[in-house]
Amino acid sequence: MFFLPPPTFKTLKALVISYLYASTLLLTVEIIQRTFKISIHITRKVIHVLSGLFMFFLLYLFEQWEYVVFLTGSFVIINYIFLRMRMVRSMDPLNGATLGTVYFAFSCAFLFGWFNKDWERGFPRGREYLAIAGIMAMTFGDASASIIGRKYGTHRVMGRKTIEGSLANFVVTMVAVPFFWYILSPPTLATRDYFTGALISASVSTCLEAISPMGSDNLTVPLGVAFTLSRLGY
């Protein structure tokens, strides 16, 4: 069973920073969207990327890993409430809204809980770089596929998906995964693993994004990438 230890002052400060960041991000993008009438598709992707990028900084912000899972898990509930109550127009369009934002938060919480730093209950330890690989594939690969596919996509496959969008997903994921791995410098990875891991991540991400409907790519891509890499021994 999952129990939260008493939070330290640094943990409390990290929680405050995290919730303030999320609130400020949503408020700022919402005001910009309403003021300048920016496409909700664009504002959703801005929130998507900046939220996903912040997941990386949680590795350095928190000292109690359980609270990272608590934080990201809380946004599963928060995002669902926002979606159902239509509270944030820049994140949830009036028409065609999906559970993508809920899947996003769930994926982060699950991966951070599984590929954690500190727990000793039979879970993998010190492999948070696998969670980051999945999250960054979702953050940057999915966003690039959507933006490029909508703007330049002319050759459609799998219904609404395009070859141009899938190619953008592949290229961006190939760059994003080794970039963040390089910053983390995982001690278990050799130099060649950065390239092969990026190639595997990009291939899995591109395929899953192409076949996942209705925002479910925010679930299938991060979990698929992280667990494929794990099963292959990364």
Image (spheres, grey):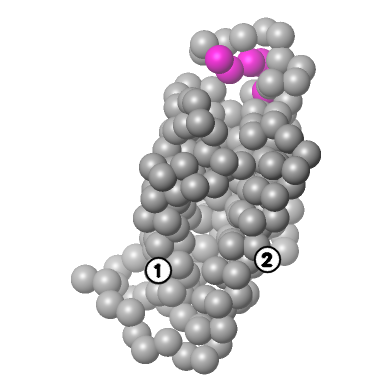
Image quadrant in which you'd find residue 148: top right
Q: Furthest-left residue in view?
A: 1
Specify whether 53 is left or right of 68.
Answer: right
Choose between 42 and 158: the one closer to the eye.
Answer: 42
First in sequence: mark 1 vs mark 2: 1
Q: Is residue 179 above or below residue 216?
A: below
In the picture, the disc for residue 185 is 2
Specify whether 132 is left or right of 25.
Answer: left
Q: Amino acid at mark 2?
A: Ser
In the picture, the disc for residue 200 is none
The spot of residue 66 in percent (x, y) is 40, 74
Choose between 107 and 181: the one closer to the eye.
Answer: 107
Q: Furthest-front residue in view?
A: 35
Q: Furthest-top residue in view?
A: 155
The residue at 42%/38% (across/down) is 99
Q: Is residue 28 above or below residue 196?
A: below
The residue at 45%/33% (across/down) is 98
Q: Is residue 47 above or below residue 217?
A: below
Q: Amino acid at mark 1?
A: Phe
* Residue underneath mark 1: 70
The spot of residue 220 in percent (x, y) is 44, 37
Specify whether 196 is left or right of 103.
Answer: right
Q: Is residue 207 above or below residue 53?
A: above
The quarter of the rendered structure image containing the N terminus is bottom left
Range shown magenta: 160-165
Image quadrant in which you'd find residue 37: top right
